[in-house]
Structures are given as C-alpha cells and as structure tokens.
C-alpha cells in the first residue's frame, strides 16, 4: 500500500500485511496453526515467528487479497472456524492498515489432533 499525504508518502510492506493476517489467523479459535504448504511434504504446524508462512498477500494501492493455508483443531466445525477466520483477518487488516480487503481465501491443509493426544496422555498418567 502506498498513500500520498501532505507530509509525504506512507507505504505498508507486503510483509507487514502478511504478518497482521497471520497473527489475526492465530488468534482465531479453532485454528491450530498455519501450514507451510503441502509442497514441503506433510503440512508443518507453524506458530510464533513463522506467522507469515501459510499467508500469501496481493496488495494494491487501496485493496488487498489474502490467501491463508491453515491447520484446524480436531473437533472444530471447519466451516464456522473458516468463516470466523475470514472475518478476523478482514477486520484486523482494515482497522490497522486502512486497506479494503476484497477477499480472504482459506485452504484447510490439515487437522491437528494435539488436544486429543494431550487428553489421552493425561489419562495414561493417572
């Protein structure tokens, strides 16, 4: 994004837009992590500093399109989680950057069974 004002030009990097989208995605209930992509073999669960992984952005002067590759938590209603994800990413980007988000595309690349494994593990310990 690039904006001309009386004081000068304001530019927001594609990486910044991708980071905002990734952080908003990770804050969405039901999202276990971002996927590094199936081309890397099995989907890798990426968190923390790697929030840009699994996020592709196309940023114009006033609009942005976002593609997300995610891993959802087992037991979640995928369609509801994805709808919430789209809304969270759209709101975060529009509020923080002023860009109009024209689309947020979501590709679910995996299901995380981590919570189920933790429950089984805690049952074995007792």
Image (spheres, helix red, strand yellow):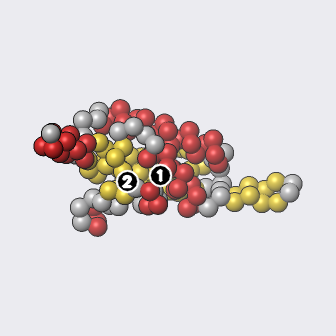
Tell me which numbered mark, 2 or 1, is placed earlier along the sequence.
1
- How many marks overall? 2
Residue 76 vs 12, above or below: the answer is: above
Residue position marked by numbered label 1 in the rendering:
22
Say if residue 120 shows up in the picture: no
Which residue is located at x 54 percent, y 51 percent?
20
Residue 43 seen in render? yes
| Residue 90 vertical position relative to residue 42 in the rendered view, above or below | above
Q: From the image, which quarter does the N terminus lie in?
A: bottom right
Q: Position of residue 46 (x, y in %)?
A: 37, 58
Q: Is residue 74 left or right of residue 120?
A: right
Q: Which residue is mark 2?
A: 34
Label annotation for residue 85? none
Q: Position of residue 111 (x, y in %)?
A: 25, 46
Residue 19 in the image: state x and y as whole percent: 52, 56
C-alpha separation, residue under disc 2 versus residue under disc 1 = 8 Å
């Amino acid at each position: 994004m690039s904006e001309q004002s009386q004081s000068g030009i304001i530019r927001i990097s594609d990486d910044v837009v991708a980071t905002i989208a990734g952080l908003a995605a990770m804050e969405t209930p039901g999202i276990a992590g971002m996927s590094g992509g199936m081309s890397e073999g099995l989907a890798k669960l990426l968190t923390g500093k790697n929030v840009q992984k699994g996020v592709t952005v196309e940023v114009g002067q006033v609009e942005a399109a976002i593609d997300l590759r995610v891993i959802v938590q087992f037991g979640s209603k995928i369609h509801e989680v994805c709808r919430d994800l789209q809304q969270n990413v759209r709101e975060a980007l529009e509020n923080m950057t002023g860009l109009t988000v024209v689309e947020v595309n979501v590709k679910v690349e995996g299901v995380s069974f981590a919570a189920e494994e933790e429950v089984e593990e805690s049952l074995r310990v007792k």
